[in-house]
Every structure is written in structure tokens, then in C-alpha cells.
């Protein structure tokens, strides 16, 4: 079996199959063997089935297949078919879907291919499409055990950020609504071919059995979060009044006061529990939304 993190092997396979890295697809292949091993060990902890997104040359797929009962890998770039037939040909528990992962019906996939198994997702995500894929997975409501992804380090920090920190934002609250995220390792740009301009990190999101809070109106809850961070340097009162979705400025100021928040508090200071409480206040007391 090939050592798929060896730069010489990567270059050999590129030459053999005439493969060139597509910048438009965010293709950067890992050269640190510890990264896929750690990701695979984490993703298969408690899960027999794995959905992988973006296998590349199979660097992560191989250790996943060694630790899971079944791996289905989703890949958009059909140029990789011949490469993967060679690098992963010895595995009988790996199959591929050649499609855009955002267009794959994951619910049907789990039902048809992973019946009775706990399923996790593992992925080396292109930077340009990281957030849409993560939110699609989290919002799907599918019974994933965990989601383990390697993404841009700055994005990883935002997913895991605590209130009142510079990285805390709407994506932090949304991620922590559905999961318990944790950065499990940092990966410098020098660990890739070709080397990207930024560092990466591996995040493990343990999916919660139920959301971390229970807003009375989930749609309003997320509308509130989006508005609070849309202009994060503004006070919460000004940010919400500027959205035009939560009543007059006076009504919003009263709502903030009723939660014992400072009149000048910013959205970045509120915890997910605070957002839930404020959202419920608006739900119960109405407004122009």
C-alpha cells in the first residue's frame, strides 16, 4: 500500500495519471502522516460507518477503512477515479459517489448504506466552501455521531470560540447549537502539497442528541443571532433596530433591559443561552417580525 503522505509518492501519482492540482477546487494534499491517522481514529471512535467528503488520493480514506466497517467517499473531481482505483483497490469496504456533496441526499445514503450503524463524517474541506458544507451537515438533522473536519485555522477558531472573544460570531453560536466543537490539532501550511497561504486545524464536532438550548421559535432565534452579528461593532440595540425585524428601537431597548443586559451590550458578549432567552422574549411579546 502506498504511503500517500510521502511527497515523492504524491508527485509520482500525479505524473502517472497526469493529475494537476485544481486551485478552483481548493486541492491541497496532506504530507504529515499523523494528521489522517488522528482524524481517522477520532471519526471512527463510536462509529462503524463513515461518510468522507473529498478523498483526494485516499490519504484519509485508507486509515478510515482500516478502522470502520464501511466508508463511502464523496468526490466531485472525476479525474481522481483512476488514481483511487489504484491507491484504494485493496479495500473492499470503500465505495465512491462522484458528485457535489451538497447535492447528495445524505438521509437516503444513510438509510440505504448504513442501516443500523452509527455514522460519522470525515472531511478535508476546501477553504472556499467550508461553511456551507458544515452548516448543511449540522442543519440536516441527520443522526451523525460526530463530524471531523480539517479546515482553515481561522475558521476552526471561530467554530469553537467563546463569548466575548474576537473570534466569536454567528457561526460559533450556530455550531455550538448543534454540537460540541473542539480543535484537536493544528496543521501548518508546510504540511501540504501545494502549500496553502494559511494554516489549518482539525475540528471534531460531537453532535448533540438535542440542541444545546430550546428556543420557542428556532427561526426567530437564528434571525436574532444573524442580526446581532451583522454589524458587530454596534451595540445590540442598534444592531437589532437596524435590521428592522424586532420592533422599534424603544421596544428592543426594553427587551434588552428586561434580560438585565447593559444598554450598551454588544451581541458578541451574549452566550447561546442569552440569545435563547432574548429570542423567547421577542417570541412571547411580539414585534414587527
Image (cartoon, helix red, strand yellow):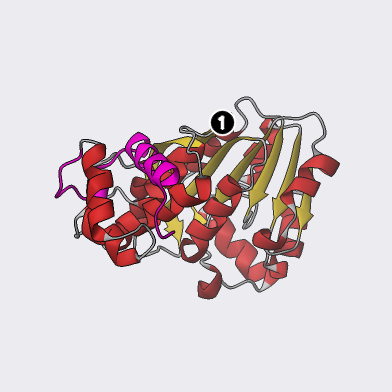
Residue 104 visible at all: yes
> Which residue appears farthest toward the top when viewing the image?
46
Quarter of the image containing the C terminus? bottom left
Q: Is residue 169 left or right of residue 106?
A: left
Q: Which residues are magenta?
A: 261-289
Q: Is residue 19 magenta?
A: no
Residue in the picture at 44% in, 47% down: 221
User: In the depicted view, which residue is nearer to us: 217 or 7?
Assistant: 217
User: Which residue is painted at 64% across and 42% down in the image?
Assistant: 141
Q: Tell me if residue 167 comes above or below residue 115 in the rendering.
A: below
Residue in front for this viewpoint, 116 or 22: 116
Looking at the rendering, which quadrant does residue 97 occupy?
bottom right
Q: Position of residue 181 (x, y in %)?
A: 44, 37
**Residue 144 percent location from the top left of the image:** 64, 37
The residue positioned 35% from the left and 65% from the top of the image is: 244
Q: Which quadrant of the figure contains the N terminus?
A: top right
Q: Is label 1 in a helix, a strand or a loop?
A: loop
Magenta-colored stretch includes residue 266? yes
Q: Residue at x 51, y 63 (%)?
A: 129
Q: Nearer the viewer, residue 250 or 24?
A: 250
Q: Which residue position is annotated with label 1?
A: 210
Would residue 204 be seen by someone viewing this image from the given angle? no
Residue 117 position, x and y percent, is: 76, 30
Amino acid at each position: 500500500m502506498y504511503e500517500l503522505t510521502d511527497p515523492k509518492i504524491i508527485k509520482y501519482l500525479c505524473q502517472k495519471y497526469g493529475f494537476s492540482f485544481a486551485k478552483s477546487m481548493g486541492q491541497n494534499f496532506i504530507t504529515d502522516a499523523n494528521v489522517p491517522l488522528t482524524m481517522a481514529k477520532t471519526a471512527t471512535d463510536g462509529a462503524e460507518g463513515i461518510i468522507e467528503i473529498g478523498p483526494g488520493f485516499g490519504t484519509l480514506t485508507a486509515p478510515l477503512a482500516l478502522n470502520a466497517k464501511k466508508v463511502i467517499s464523496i468526490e466531485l473531481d472525476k479525474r481522481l477515479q483512476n488514481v483511487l482505483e489504484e491507491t484504494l483497490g485493496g479495500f473492499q469496504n470503500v465505495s465512491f459517489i462522484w458528485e457535489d456533496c451538497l447535492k447528495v441526499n445524505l438521509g437516503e445514503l444513510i438509510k440505504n448504506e448504513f442501516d443500523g450503524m452509527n455514522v460519522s463524517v470525515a472531511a478535508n474541506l476546501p477553504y472556499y466552501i467550508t461553511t456551507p458544507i458544515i452548516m448543511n451537515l449540522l442543519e440536516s438533522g441527520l443522526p451523525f455521531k460526530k463530524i471531523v473536519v480539517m479546515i482553515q485555522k481561522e475558521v476552526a477558531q471561530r467554530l469553537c470560540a467563546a463569548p466575548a472573544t474576537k473570534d466569536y460570531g454567528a457561526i460559533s453560536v450556530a455550531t455550538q447549537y448543534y454540537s460540541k466543537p473542539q480543535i484537536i490539532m493544528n496543521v501548518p501550511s508546510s504540511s501540504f502539497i501545494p502549500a496553502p497561504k494559511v494554516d489549518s486545524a482539525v475540528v471534531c464536532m460531537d453532535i448533540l442528541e438535542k440542541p444545546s438550548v430550546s428556543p420557542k421559535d428556532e427561526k426567530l432565534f437564528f434571525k436574532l443571532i444573524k442580526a446581532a452579528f451583522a454589524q458587530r461593532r454596534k451595540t445590540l440595540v442598534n444592531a437589532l433596530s437596524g435590521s428592522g425585524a424586532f420592533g422599534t428601537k424603544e421596544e428592543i431597548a426594553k427587551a434588552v433591559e428586561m434580560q438585565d443586559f447593559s444598554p450598551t451590550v454588544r451581541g458578541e458578549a451574549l452566550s447561546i443561552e442569552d440569545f435563547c432567552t432574548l429570542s423567547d422574549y421577542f417570541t412571547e411579546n411580539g414585534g414587527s417580525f
